[in-house]
Amino acid sequence: MAITSKTQRKVVYLKFPPERSGRPIMCNLTRLFDLTFNILSAHILPRGEGRMTLELTGTSDNYKKGIEYLKDQGIKTENVAQKISRDEETCIDCGLCTSLCASQALSVNPESRKVEFDSEKCTACGMCTRVCPVNAMNVELENGD
Ligand code: SF4
Ligand code: SF4
């Protein structure tokens, strides 16, 4: 798929019921909806339920269709950007988190020297929550704590 100005990138968190694990659902996102996917993390819970953080790239239209397809397959989807937050009043702009944030969702503004957070870039890796001295970052995902 060619990357154009109409393509967008989103990170979603998926919850698979046990009977869906092992099916070619991710490949179908590419085959049926021309979406490029990148699995950022995946694990299986003891009862066989799957958890996955997935980066999807494609047109807005195809993204919506792909998400509908996942829901039709019984997979619960959550937009990762809505699950990550920073307590602006608690953050002391120490910058510790920025060196660990591989997706550059956290970065230092060179002019203000304040640390800025772009939730759309966040991949819910949870690294910032481990180093933040004042617990300003909150990741509400089972694989992000
Ligand atoms: S969880 Fe934190 S460190 Fe990981 S991508 Fe998001 S903001 Fe960056
Ligand atoms: S580590 Fe915590 S306090 Fe420091 S800049 Fe990041 S979010 Fe703010």
Image: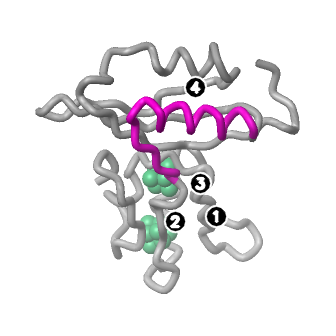
Mark linked to residue 108: 1
Query: Badges 1 and 2: C-beta atoms under 8 Å apart?
Result: yes
For the N terminus, which image quadrant? top right
Q: Mark 4 to mark 1: distance in Å?
A: 29 Å
* Mark 3 or mark 4: whose residue is earlier in sequence: 4
Q: Secondary structure at mark 1?
A: strand
Which residue in the rendered view is the most extreme toward the right? 5
Which of the pair 24/99 is nearer the observer? 24
Q: Mark 4 to mark 2: distance in Å?
A: 30 Å
**Amino acid beneath label 2:** Gly
Specify few, some or many for label 1: CA neighbours under 10 Å numbering under 14, 14-19, or 20 or more.
some
The residue under label 3 is 105
The residue under label 4 is 37
Mark linked to residue 95: 2
| Residue behind label 1 places its C-beta within 8 angstroms of ligand 2 | no
35 is higher (above) or lower (below) than 78 = above
**Amino acid beneath label 1:** Val
| Residue behind label 2 places its C-beta within 8 angstroms of ligand 2 | yes
Specify few, some or many for label 3: CA neighbours under 10 Å numbering under 14, 14-19, or 20 or more.
some
| Residue behind label 3 places its C-beta within 8 angstroms of ligand 1 | yes
Q: State which mark lies toward you, 3 or 1.
A: 3
Q: Secondary structure at mark 3?
A: loop
Q: Which residues are magenta?
A: 61-80
Circle count: 4
Q: Is residue 100 visible?
A: no
